Every structure is written in structure tokens, then in C-alpha cells.
Image: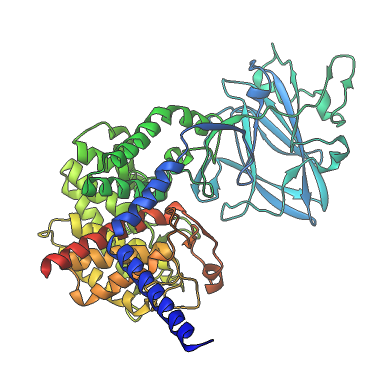
Amino acid sequence: MDNRLLKLLILFLALSLLFWNCRQTEEFSNPAETVELIIDNVVNTTEWDFQFVPQKTVLGVQIIDFGRTYNLRKNSVAYSLSYLKAEKDTTISFGLDHTAPLKIWINNKPVYVNPKDSDIEFEEIAYGMIEFPASFKANLQAGHNKILVKSVCSNSRWQFVIRPITEDLMHEGSVDFSLDPLNSQNISADWLCAGPFDGEGKNLDKILDLQFPPEEEIKPVCLFSNNEYRFNWTIPQKNTLAKINSPYEDWAYNGWHYSIGALMMAILDYSEIEATPDYTNYVQKYTDFVNKHKKYFRWQYEDLLALRGSYHRLFRKNMLDDTGAPALSFISLALKNNSSEYSQIIEPVASYIMEEQIRLEDGTLCRPEPVKYTVWADDLFMSVPFLLRMAELSGEEQYYDEATSQIISFTEKLYNEEKELFHHGWFSKTSSCSPVFWGRANGWVVWAIGEALSILPEEHPDYSRIKQIYQKHLNGLIQFQDESGMWHQVLDHPESFAETSSTAMFTLGLARGIREGWLSRDLTDNALLAWQGLQKYISEEGVVSSICKGTGIGKTLEFYFTRPTYPNDPRGLGAVIYAGMEIKKLNEFIKNEQ
């Protein structure tokens, strides 16, 4: 290669590098463009139409709805048949709920009988943890064990629910229901039903004792015949559920989820700042959509027992994940419009947080998972931002006091003075913390306390203390910032992957803190570098990558290191939008200062 050609090549490379740096600087200094790419992608890919799908078994919960398989007729009798496969001889506990008199046999031995009817009362108290009003134990032999259930129609609902459980109320997993012994019949179901048999004219208390042919002999999917009855075993009727499609994982952007609450609040706030009414209209469309279809989805959850149906969290309402954070767009719109339109959503949420959510003896919000009375760092965001807005909406100081009390109590239990980071969880039984400093758990804390400092009156007696907590935490976090600007999945382990949702939360925390005077301006470079690092994980289509999936409290580093990530997982989108907004404000603040 001659010298002239070499010089031209060097010049080309230099110009290319200059162009790239200019492009990066332009993108870096115009975060609004990036934010709008993300919002536009969300708006354009939100599905508003329903897809109707068969109801599936979830969480190992078996639901047999005789009332939809047969016509409801009082004193009618029906049977259901399945098999339990055990790897070895064992004893298993089962949780049970039923609306009508019920009798159960396993391997032809009676294991449960209850002649009373009742309402369905079982509930999911935490992710996959279900409490049942009744239970029984049964001895299983290695191999397949026949389970036969008999039920008598006694009211307007004719259902039973059963699930293998362990002491911690989780699904056993080693024992499942199926019709494996009948595979030669090519049956695509886990249960068969037979009936209805006529118990008319007989005393309801005595019908369970009457013997009908299914108790005599089991010959599934073939005709039974004796002097009195002729019937077939049939596959029970499956319910159909309306489901909202989602382009990413299982979370529709217009669903009811803590991440959606944060996302919608972010879009609404951006719309306010940038005067983009189309974005406000999108959030309004979302809240109207929820209100319009709430009654239908309540019916799916409560009548069809759709544990994972659309909007199931809105009606499950047994944890902060289901309440405070998902309602943020509703309470934000109520404040914006000075409207009581959303009171049917907002007031039950406020009541739940203040009166129903499980707590420690000192009042700290906690969960029953992974063991009873566990404090999760995540729950600061699931509660505090809503409580602060509830104080503004209602004018009641108790909500401010509740928010500050939680921040102080969470800090006392979860904050590590040496690392200046928050542990993911604290266990009351041992008064000890989980061992890992998870990135997003710390991000939720930063975001929640930043909201408190923004909304809480400065004259509040806890304001100064909360500001000190914020300052110490953010100064601790910058020690673990990567040279690329990013933070990692496990903050003090740079070998774990760079994670965008936590980085975005720290970015918004730094930028807001510097601009508001809570943090030193010396941290400006850290905030700007963090936003620059985030750009590499945002595509030209507005898709954000490297967002960690929802995560329980793990015992090992490996658990966190191997968590999956999903592009545009809503758990990170609201934070990235806010990070862009705060960096834009910080840039303007710096410019005005100059």
C-alpha cells in the first residue's frame, strides 16, 4: 500500500470516528428523542383486542367445573376421575376447596368427605403460595394412583379445586394429575367426568352415601350399563378466557402490573413536560380500558377461577405488587384532573396498603415469601410513591407519615453500612439479610426515596433523615459504576451482566438529586456517563435490552447471575423513560448555570 493510499485510509477512519462521536454526542444531548422512540414503540405495539383461549391449568391447581359440564340441577350427582403418579411410596398433602358436598377416594379408599356446601375461599397469598380452606393427606403408592371425586349439586356454583401442597403452601411438583394409564384412548385431558345422576327426592345429607356405578368399577371412555343407568365418561367442559396479546413475554402494556403502573406514570409525566397530548391520550385510553372491562375480568377471576387470566392481579390484591405500583397512573390522572373518576380503583388500594397488607410487629410492610415475614427492598417502590400521591389527593398527613416510616424502617433492616448498599431481603425469623445486593432492588429504593424527597413537604420531621439516607446510598452506588457507565445485575460483582433497569433507576436518582440540590454536583459526570451507557442498550426502534426478568429473593450469586433478560420487559421501561427525562432536565440545568 503506497503512502498516499495509507493517508487516505487514516483520514477516512478519523472522519468516521469523528462522525460517530458527533452522533453519540447528539444522541447523548437529546435524550428526549430516545425517550420518544421508546414511548412510540410501546404505543404502537400495544394490543387492544382480545384473543379467546382455552383455560389452562396453572400453578398445579386442578379446577373441575361440573356446572359448566352439566346443567345445574339441585341434588344431581357427578364424578370426576384422574390419576396421580408417584415416584415412590409416599404421603402427600392436598389443599382443597369446593362449593358442594364432596367425597374423594384414592385407590378406592375414602380420604375426604364433607357433606356441606360453601363459597370458593382459596386464595393466592403470594406468588404460587395458595391457602386452602380444607386439606387432607393421602398415602400414594409408587406408580399411578386412581383418584375419584364425587360431588352433589347444591347451589348456583358446582366446582371443586384441588392441589398437592407442601408446608410452605407451594405446589409439590413431584405429583401431578393426568390420565396417563389411559393413553391408549388418546385422551387430551387430565380428568374425565361422569354424570349427572339423579338424586332428586332424596335428602341432601344422604346423597353422598348413595352408590352410583362409577364407584363400582372404572371403565373410562366406554359405556356403563346396568339395570338402572347408562352413561359415558366424558372430558369436562373447558372454559374460554379473553386474553390480551403482548409482543414481549406475557405482560401486555395495558395490563395490571407494577411495571405497567411505573410505565404509564412515566409516559404521563413525559407528556406533561413536553406537551405531547397524544401520550396523555394513550394513558387515558389505558385507564378507560381497565375501567370498561373490569367487570368482565372480575367474572373471569372469581367465577371461572382464572388464576392467571388477564387482570388477575387487580382482583387477587394480596400483595403490594398488585396494588400500590399498578395504580400509579390512576392516582396521577386523578391529581392531574382533580377528578374522583378513579376512586373505585384508588380507594381500595389505599385501604389495602394501610389496613390489609401483611406487616411486622413494628409496622414494616413485608411478605409471606420466601418465608413468613420477609421484608423486600422492592416493596418500597410498590408502596411509597402511591402513598405520597394519596397524601396529596386526600390531604391526609397519615399517608406522608406512613411513607416516611416505611423508608426509615426498610433502611434499618436492609441497608449495609460497609457496602453502602441495600440487601434484597430481610428475614424476621433470623433477623438477617439475604446475601446478595441485587441491582434493581437498590434501584426501587432509589426511585422510591427520590419520589419522597420530591413530594414530601420539607418541613416534615423525617425529611432531613430521608435525604441523608438518599445521599449515603447514591454515594455508595457510584463506587460500583462500571467504566461504561452501567451498573451490574449484582452490584458488587462486575462479572455479572450489565443491567439496564437498575442503571436507569440510578441515572434518574443521580440526575434528579443533582438538579434538586440533594446531591453534590461532583456526581454530574456519573449521571451523564450512565445515560451514555444506556444508549448502547436502546435500539433505533426504541427497544430496550438487558432488562432482568422478575426476580425472587435468591440465596446464591448464581441465582442472580443466570436470571433471563427480555427486550422491552416493562419492568425497566418506565425507569429508562424517567432517566431520559431527568437527564434532559439536568442538561438544561447545567446550561442555565453556565
Number of numbered callouts drawn: 0
Q: Which residue is nearer to you in this view: 184 or 219?
A: 184
User: In which quadrant will I find the N terminus?
Assistant: bottom right
Specify the quadrant that holds the C terminus.
bottom left
Q: Residue at x 16, y 64 (%)?
A: 589
* Image quadrant where residue 14 sits: bottom left
Q: Is residue 376 above or below residue 53?
A: below
**Quadrant of the rendered image containing residue 515:** bottom left
Q: Horizontal and vertical percent for residue 371?
A: 49, 60
User: Vertical placement of 42 versus 457: above or below?
Assistant: above
In the figure, residue 449 lies in which quadrant?
Answer: bottom left
What percent of the width, then of the height, locates residue 564? Answer: 55, 62
Q: Is residue 448 above or below residue 288?
A: below
Q: Nearer the viewer, residue 265 or 277?
A: 277
Which residue is more in the foreground, 421 or 555? 421
Point out the residue furthest to the bottom here: 3
Q: Residue drawn at (32%, 55%), measured in percent from left and top?
A: 33
Q: Is residue 416 visible?
A: no
Seen in the image, is 248 located left or right of residue 67?
left
537 or 237: nearer the viewer: 537
The residue at the point 21 percent across, 40 percent down is 336
- Residue 273: x, y in percent? 22, 49
Q: In the image as oriented, which residue stretches furthest toward the top?
A: 201
x, y percentage for residue 580?
30, 59
In the picture, measured across the screen, residue 276 lies left or right of residue 148, that is: left
Please give the name of the residue rendered at 39% of the width and 34% of the height, measured from the top-left corner.
Answer: 290
